[in-house]
Amino acid sequence: MTSRARFLAALACQPLERPPLWVMRQAGRYLPEYRALKAKSSFLEMVKTPAVATEVTLQPLRRFPGLDAAILFSDILVIPEALGQPYAFRDTGGIAMSYRLETRAQVDALNPSEAVTEKLAYVGEALALLKKELTTSADPAISHKALLGFGGSPWTLATYMVEGGSSDDFERIKLLFYTDRATFDALLEKLTAALIVYFQMQIRAGADAIQIFDSWGGILSGQDYQAASLRWIRQIVAALPAGFPIILYAKGTATQLTDQAFSGVRAISLDWTHELAITRRNLPDNIAVQGNLDPVLMQTTPEIVARETTRLLESMRGAHGHIFNLGHGITPAAKIECMHALVDTVTTWKN
């Protein structure tokens, strides 16, 4: 069975000898080959240059051939930029938007969703290059791997746009939600329309699945999650081709799992705070789960990683519809030898 077939079979909750494996934020500063490329270009230049984005996406696969999927090297904030609100990285860390949304007039002035196809054409070009490599390459490390596209949820993107970048308290976006629902909804409607266009473009370019990152869904009061976030995710899923696999990652939203499972997504990606086996039993049989090793383990030792990975795998023995992953993105401090241990443990385990 090819890696791509294994990945898609897991999303369809079919029985497999072992779970497929990929890691969120696969590329990055823990890889010396990435740092070598980064020394020549800024992050944004790398994202916007299809040949470079393709190379960065493939780097982890070449180093760790046991990975079953490649995820496009990009950023969720390309959507606000396409709508007319660019972003940059602060010298002190975190994200800075070029300005913050403060009025209804600013929301109304954002570019229409139709602008996404033109302004983000480089994403489609990168995906098309990747699809060709993954389909035709003679290199067994990258051939016949699944290809994932992704984007942020409307709510998560809105937090950056209204806060003006990274935030500690998310006060402004919450106040907008509670005190000016009309403007909040107008912004989320624009983001939802743009994401539908964006994901449709990614699918046309060859993505086998799309992951939606609702990274800040967990900051919402539980009773508000539906109105502020999940209703917009439902609209996106409903507008995409019927049956196309969508994976939802919503950090810190354990109380929302049942509603998420009935949102139309094919799989739910879980952070490391979930008891994976219990969550698997409590979700419908047709919903796959992804996760959920604690990323900090990648900073320990290969022995610890192998032990904890085996423990997680054993907890899922006999279960269908599991994609092995970290419970969040891999960090710059991750050790390459720990990643090797993770890949070796998953790929040699038998269900």
Image: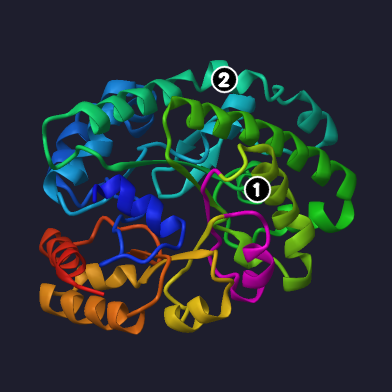
The image shows residue 329 at horizontal and vertical percentages of: 37, 57
Tell me which corner region of the image, top left, top right, bottom left or bottom right, holds residue 255. Answer: bottom right
Residue 85: say if magenta: no
Q: Is residue 68 left or right of residue 15?
A: left
Q: How many marks?
A: 2
Q: Amino acid at mark 1?
A: Glu
As rendered, which of 64 and 4 lies closer to the eye? 4
**Label 2 residue SS:** helix
**Which mark, residue 117?**
2
Q: Which residues are magenta?
A: 244-265
The image shows residue 81 at horizontal and vertical percentages of: 56, 29
According to the picture, the residue beneath numbered tag 1 turns out to be 163
As rendered, which of 163 and 80 lies closer to the eye? 80
Residue 261: say if magenta: yes
The mark nearer the N terminus, 1 or 2, is 2
Look at 25% across and 73% down and name the residue there.
Answer: 297
Look at 29% across and 82% down and name the residue there.
Answer: 314
As rendered, which of 188 and 312 lies closer to the eye? 312
